[in-house]
Image: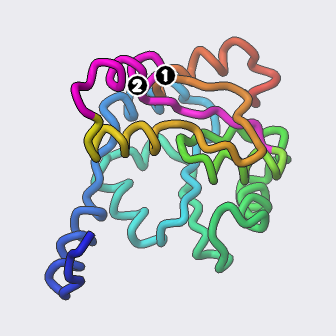
Amino acid sequence: LGLSATPDFVATVAEAYDALALYPEARTALAALAGLRLAIFSNGSPAMLGRLVAQAGIGDLLETVISVDEIGVYKPDPRGYVHVEARLGLARGEILFVSSNGFDIAGARAHGFRVARIARLPDEALRRDLVGAATIGPALMFKALRLRPERLGFEADVTIAALTDLAALVARDEDAWGR
């Protein structure tokens, strides 16, 4: 990007990352899943995750937050998913893993978790943006590349458009999705 990594710049980026906002529907979606064992599993540090959960006000909706720091590997290392099973006391087939990231999806599916992929920008909306563009600039190109699912050999079991779709997904098949 041609940006200098001065201490001030690094601090500014880190501060912004530590203040990430929830997607607008996140709290409502998590509340709709009350009664399920909900957890965050992240490559973030426990301190960072703790700050984000507290700032977002969702700690009351989660059973736990699991960081890869606890075992010293990063997703999609299989040991991370084994760690999730151990922390939750659940078998891999009892876990529904939700992500929009291809590496997360591939790692979780390869391990045997059931996976729901969030496709926040439906293919049709992306198609409209691309076809309707007078020019395809860097921002639109990034969107086209980043928002398409990576093909890493393992696909999600189901694709949803938003977190609020999870409650209906779980309700459709309570036994299969671990309620």
Q: Label 1 crowding class (10 Å Cα cut-off): few <14, some 14-19, many 20+?
A: few
As drawn, 39 above or below 157: below
Q: Label 2 crowding class (10 Å Cα cut-off): few <14, some 14-19, many 20+?
A: some
* x and y, in percent, of residue 119 in the image: 50, 30
Task: State the image quarter where residue 12 is shown.
Answer: bottom left
* x and y, in percent, of residue 6 in the image: 18, 86
Q: Residue at x 36, y 41 (%)?
A: 141
Three-letter amino acid code of the residue under disc 1: Asp
Q: Are marks 2 and 1 in contact (CB under 8 Å)?
A: yes
As drawn, 101 above or below 179: below
Residue extent of the magenta highlight: 113-135
* x and y, in percent, of residue 47 in the image: 41, 72
Q: Secondary structure at mark 1?
A: helix
Q: Residue at x 17, y 78 (%)?
A: 9
Q: Which mark is residue 123?
A: 1
The residue tagged 2 is 126
- Is residue 134 found inside the magenta-colored segment of the image? yes
The C terminus, quarter of image: top right
